[in-house]
Amino acid sequence: MDLLLENLTVRVDGRALVAALRLTVGHDEVVGLVGPNGSGKSTTLRCVYRALAPAAGRILLDGADLHGMRRRDAARRVAALTQDQRVELDFTVFEVVAMGRAPHRRDHERLTRAERELCRRALDRLDVAHLADRSVLTLSGGERQRVLIARALVQEPRVLVLDEPTNHLDIRHQLALLGLLRRAGLTTLVALHDLNLAATVCDRIAVLHEGRLVAVGPPVEVLTAELVRRVFEVDAVVVRHPRTGAAQLLYDAPEGPAGG
């Protein structure tokens, strides 16, 4: 499924948080949104998972207007992991993951055997199967993050939207998650702070600055020292990973005494 953000504009109190953004994400493509804090990454993603309506522009899924769809139909196509997603009630991990089937079931309808197996596979893929009977309230931040990603996969979406999915995850689970994204076969739009992780996992990177798209393309073409200095206001040397060839950034240490 192809995702098109067509001249997307979001305004709050007369100020454009996102301005005339045009971006495509193709089938089976992972596109990373990167940019400094306040650049419009999360605002853009909120429009894609319909938490926010744009002031202008459209979001199209294979040519169909996402915001014109019924909520259940949209939820069958788009799954999201948001920064502020919380589970405050005392559900088990398995119950939380099973909530991903809600767009596909009638109210109070029991899970089928196939759906329960789908949940178990998602738990395995995210390395949380051993937590299935635990209360979600007892989990660490990283464990809870993986449970919520499993719930999104159980939704069987065509489009996956992830806002900082590696938050709270240790490096092993960060890399495992990013590898999973590459193998999932989904149209994926993901916001990431870590430019090196973005360069490792993403087919293309879209750089936002003050709500505008300033560069888009393969990481090795987009992540230049000049762009990093202009957009992120830091100095970096760009090198190639010796095994994968991916662009990687080596940052200069800040000047001045270290804090105690």
Image (cartoon, grey):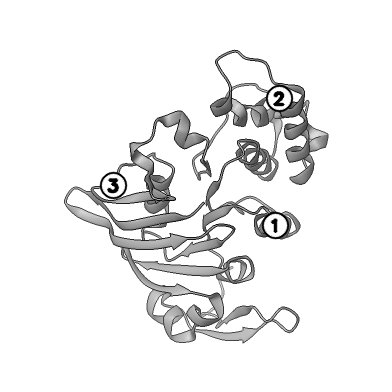
> What SS does tag 1 mark?
helix
User: Which amino acid type is marked by label 1?
Assistant: Arg
Residue positioned 33% across, 37% down in the render: 68
> What SS does tag 2 mark?
loop
Q: Nearer the viewer, mark 1 or mark 2?
A: 1
Q: CA distance from mark 1 to mark 3?
A: 31 Å
Identify whether 117 is placed above or below 211: above
Residue at numbered disc 1: 183
For marks 1 and 3 on the same chain, the one whose residue lies earlier in the sequence: 3
* Pointer 1 with pointer 2, Cβ within 8 A: no
- Looking at the image, residue 200 sits to the left or right of residue 44; the answer is right
- Looking at the image, residue 114 sits to the left or right of residue 70; the answer is right
- Viewer-side residue, 134 vs 138: 134
Picture quadrant of residue 116: top right
User: Which amino acid type is marked by label 3?
Assistant: Pro
Q: Position of residue 82 (x, y in %)?
A: 50, 44
Categorize mark 1 by other alpha carbons within 10 Å: few (<14), some (14-19), many (20+). few
Q: Position of residue 195 (x, y in %)?
A: 55, 70
User: Which amino acid type is marked by label 2?
Assistant: Thr
Residue positioned 58% across, 66% down in the render: 202
Categorize mark 3 by other alpha carbons within 10 Å: few (<14), some (14-19), many (20+). many
Residue at numbered disc 2: 92
> What SS does tag 3 mark?
loop
Q: Position of residue 252 (x, y in %)?
A: 55, 83
Q: CA distance from mark 1 to mark 2?
A: 28 Å
Residue positioned 68% across, 24% down in the render: 95
For marks 2 and 3 on the same chain, the one whose residue lies earlier in the sequence: 3
Picture quadrant of residue 170: bottom right
Tag shown at residue 54: 3
